[in-house]
Image: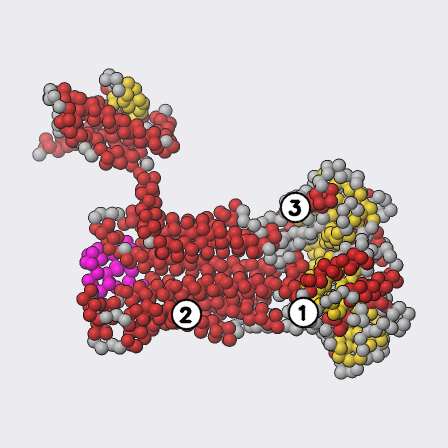
Amino acid sequence: MSFFGALRHRLRVLLRPAAYQRELDEEFRFHLALDAMQRQHASQAPDGSVARMEARRRFGNVTSMKEETRHMAGLGFFDVLLQDLGFALRTLRRAPGFTTVAILTLAFGIGANTAIFSAVDAMLLRALPFRDPDQLMKLSIVRPAHGDRPGSDDGVWSYLKFAVVRDAQKDFTSLGISAEDQATITGGSDAERASGEVVNAEYLPTLGIQPILGRGITSEEERNKGAERVVLIGERLWQRRFNADPAVRGKALVIDGKPYTIVGVVPVGFRGLSGRAEWWVPVGARYEEVFEPDEAWDHRFILTARRKPGVTTARAKAAVQVLGARMNQAYPDPRYNGGPPEGAMARELDATRVDPVVRRSLLVLLGAVGLVLLIACANVANLFLVRAASRSREIAVRLAVGAGRKRLVRQLLTESLLLSLLGGVASVAFAWAGVRLLSSLNPASALRSQGIEGLGAVTFSSIHLDLTAFGFAAALALVTGILFGLVPAIAATRPSLTSALKEGTAPPARALGGIRWPGSRSVLAAVEIALALVLLAGSGLMLRSLANLLNVEPGFDPDRMLSLRLNLPGQGSRDSMPGFYDQVIERLSALPGVTGVAIGSCPPLSGGCNGTVVDLRDRPPAKEGTEPAVGVHWITPTWPAVMRVPLEKGRVFTGSDRKGTRKAVLVSHTAAQKLWPGEDPIGRPIGVGQGGFWKDTAYVAGVIGDVRYGTLDSLPGADVYLPYAQSPGSRMMVFVRAAGDPLMLAGPVRAALRGLAPDLPVYDMRTMSSRVADAAARARQGAVLLALFAGVALLLATMGIYSVISFAVTQRTREIGIRVALGATRGEVLRLVVGQGTALAVVGGILGLGAAFLATRVLQSLLFGIEPLDPVTFGVVVALLGVAAVLASWIPARRAAGVDPVVALREG
Amino acid sequence: MLILQTLTVQSMHGYGIAQHIGRLSGSVLAVEQGSLYPALERLQKKGWVGSKWADSPTGRRARYYTITAAGRRQLGEEISAFDRVLLAINGVMRRA
C-alpha cells in the first residue's frame, strides 16, 4: 500500500506539475493564514498585519521553501533545465553573429551528412522491396576465362539450363527467372515503348509479390506455346491505359502486334528485378523457341531463388555448385572444347544490389561528408572557446559567488546542445535539397553506359528522406552538440578565479586560465587544416580524373547530333527493312537543318553492343574456343561520314554493297592491328560469327577509326562493321547530324517518321552529347560533390585559422604595443602574426598530408588516368591551403601592425 | 522522526504538525516552520506518509497528512536506534 502510495504520489507530481504547484501554494497560504490568526488571537492586537508578518517570520523564506519542496519532489531537474534553456536562448540571442555562423555551419554539416546517409541507406542498407529478402539468392553461370574470352561469374541462364537446376535442386522453395525486354504496346491509346519482363510461373511467388487484382502466371502458361497469351500489368500501366478499371481482367493488351489477355495487376511500386518493368508475360508466350534443345546456349534469364527455411546460405551455395556441374554435363558449351567447364554459383541477392563502384563511391562520399562535419564541429568548438574566453570573467564571477562547476558545465552544454539542435532543424533544408539532387541523378541509362551493374530495383530514385534519415540527423545533432560543447565547457569552467577577476591586467594568455594559448584552439585549427587537406586532395584527384575522362576521344563527334531508336515490327520480311530505312534516311535528310542521317545498330559509349568471333579465312582455322573476339555493328554507307569517324584505308560502304553482291566489312583501327598485325588488311577474307557472315566469306573493304562503345575509361575494342543492306535487322538507331541545335529537330523528325509509319514508336530520343555526358556522369557527380565538400572544408578551416589568429592578436595587443615601442617595425609585426598562422598551417598540413596519403588509396579504383599519390594534385592542394592560411592570418596581422603603442600600453 | 511520531496521534495538516512539535519541545526544536514542507515531501516520496485534502475546522480546505504502515515500521526502527544511542550516551555520561 505504502509503496504504491509513494509511487502514486511521485507520478502525480511528475505528470501534473501545475496542479502540484497550486496545491503547494494553497497549503502554504493556509499555514500562514492559520498561524496569523492564532497570533492575532493570542496578542489581541487589532491590526492583523503584525500577526501576518510574525507568521511569515516564523515560517521562513516562502519562495525558497517552495523551491526546496519542489526540489525534494523531484521537479528540480525540470526547473533547472528550463532555467538553463531560457538562459541559453538569451545568451545566443545576444550574439546573433556567432549564433548564425554556428547554426549554419552545423546545419550544412548535418544536412549534407543526412543526405548522403539517405543515399547510403537506400542504395546499400534498406531491405530489398521483396518479401523476406534475406532468403533470396541470385544464381549465376560461372564461365572461366579461356583463350581470347574473359571469364565471368555472373552469367545469365538459358531456359534449358535453368530447367536442369530447377528439377534437381532440393534447397529452394521456388526459382524465378526473368528477362528484361522492351516492346511496343498498342491498342486503346497511343503506341508506346514499355519495358517488361518475360518470366516463369514461379517468378512472382519467389519474390513474394501477390497480384492486387486477378492471378499470377500458371505453369501451363509458362511452357505452353500455342495457347492463349496472358499478361500481368503494373499498376502504372493499368492507370495509364485502362484508367485503373477494376474490370480490366480479360481485356487485351497488344504487345509487338500480338494480343495478350490481361489476367492480373501487380501492386504499385513493383517494377520487377529490372526496376523498370510494366508488363510481365510467360516465357512461352514471347520466347517460344527457348524450349528447343539447340537453344540451351541462348542465355538471357536472371535466376532468383528463395531458400527453404532452415537452409543456410553456405549450404545453398554448396548445393548450387554441385548443380552447376550437373548443368555443364547436360549442356557442355560446344565452343569450350578442352577448356575449363562451366559451373554455377549462388550469392545473396542483397549482395548484388549495387555495383561495387557505386558502393565505393557512396562510402567515399560518406567518409568525406563525415570529415566535413568533424571540421564543422571543430570550428564551432573553436567559436565556443573564443566566446568562452571572452566570457571568462562572467564565468569566474559566477564560480566565485558559489555556482557549482557541474552546474556551469551543464549550463554551457545546454547552450551547445540547443545550438546543435537548432542546427539540426535547419539542416533539414540542406538535407532536403541534397536528397532531391541525389535522387534525380543517374537515370538507369547513365548507369549502364558506365558499365555499372547491379539490381535495377535499387535505384537512386529510391533515395528519400524518411524517419531513419531524420533519426540519423537528430542523433548527429546530439552527438555534435556534446562533441563541440563539452571540451570548451570543461575548459571554460577551470579558470583560476583570481586572475580572471583582475580585469585582464595580467598577461591575458594566463588570465584565460584553462584556455591556454596556444592551447586547444590551435590544436583544433590544425586538425581542421589537416582534415581539409585530406578532402582537398581527394577532390583534386577526382577532378583531375574527371578531366582525363572528358579528354578521352570517343572516336566520333557527338556535337549537334540527335539520336533515336526505331524498332520495326518483327513480322515484316527482313528484306523489306533496308528499303524502309532507306526511306527514313531520305525523309530525314530532306528536313531543313539536317546535314546528315545515318543508321547504326548500337550507339557509342552505351555498352551492350553485339559481340562475336571472327575466322580469318586465309589462315589455318584457330582452335575452337580461341577464335579472336570482336564487337560487331551494322551500319549504312553514310555512317562513317555522319559520325565523323575517319576512314584510314580502303573505302567505306557504298550503295552497291547490297544483298546479292560480294559481302564486305569495315574493320576498326584496333581490329586491323589485332587481326593482321603489320599487314595490309584490305581485301582479306573473313568470316564473322553473326548476321549471316559466317557461311559466306566477306572481304575487308576498309579500315576506320576506333570508336569507344563501352565506357569512356576502357580502351576501344576490335570492331567489325557489316553493311546494313547485306544483313538487315529490325531494331536500329538513327543518327541525325544538325546544322544548329539538335533538339530543335526533335519535333520535325518525329513528325516525319510518323508520316512514314504511324504505328512505329520513336523512343530513346536524345542528343549524342547527353549520351557522352552520361558516360562521365558518375565521375562528374563524385567529383562535383567531393569538390563541394572540400570547398566547404577549406572555407571552414580558413575561418578556423582566422579566428585563432585574430583572437591571439586581440589578446597580445599589449605585448605587440611593447614590441612596437621598443622599435619593432610594421613588417616585423606582420611577419610575427602571419608566421603564427603559417605555423598552424604547416603543422596541420603535415598531419593532413600523412592522412591524405593513406586516405586517397581508397579512391584508387575510382580514378582514371591518375595515381592516388599524384604529386601535381598534392602540390596544388598544399599551395592552396598555404595561400588560405596566409590570407586568414593577413587580416588580423594588419590589425596587429596598426597597433598604436601608446594606446595599447595605456589601455593594457 | 518527530513528524512521524506526531502523526501517530492523528492525521494533521502541516500547521498542526508544526504547532504540535513546537508545543511539545518548548522552543528548543523550533526551527523555521516552512522547512517542515520539504521534509513532508521527502516522507511522502519514501511512502511513510500519505496525504489527502479535507476540510479543516476553520472551514478552509487543508492537506492532511497520515502516517502509513511503512511509516510506523520506520518510526519503530528509528526509535529503537535512537534509544540505543540514548542509552549509550547515558551510559557514557554516568560513568564520567
> What residue is drawn where x is 89% and y is 73%?
A662
> What residue is drawn where x is 42% and y is 55%?
A104
Dot label at residue A269: 3
Q: Is residue A776 magenta?
A: no
Q: Position of residue A520 (x, y in %)?
A: 33, 62
Dot label at residue A478: none
Q: CA distance from mark 3 to mark 2?
A: 50 Å
Q: Earlier in the sequence, mark 2 or mark 1?
A: 1
Which amino acid does the dot numbered 2 rest on? Ala
Q: Among all residues in the image, which is located at the extreme right?
A: A660
Q: Give the residue at mark 2.
A: A884
Quadrant, the N terminus of chain A: top left
Q: Is residue A205 above or below residue A117?
A: above
User: Within 10 angstroms of label 3, few (less than 14), some, or many (20 or more) residues?
Assistant: few
> What residue is drawn where x is 16% and y is 21%?
A38
Q: Chain of mark 1?
A: A
Front residue of A230 and A178:
A230
Would you say A848 lies left or right of A202 here? left
Would you say A397 lies left or right of A97 here? left
Would you say A25 lies left or right of A532 here? left
> Regarding mark 2 in the picture, which secondary structure is present there?
helix
Specify start and end residues of the magenta stretch as a single range. Answer: A491-519
Q: Position of residue A351 (x, y in %)?
A: 63, 54
Which amino acid does the dot numbered 1 rest on? Asp
Q: CA distance from mark 2 to mark 1?
A: 40 Å
> Regarding mark 3 in the picture, which secondary structure is present there?
loop
Q: Give the residue at mark 1.
A: A559
Q: Given contact means CB atoms under 8 Å apart, are the residues at marks 1 and 3 in contact?
A: no
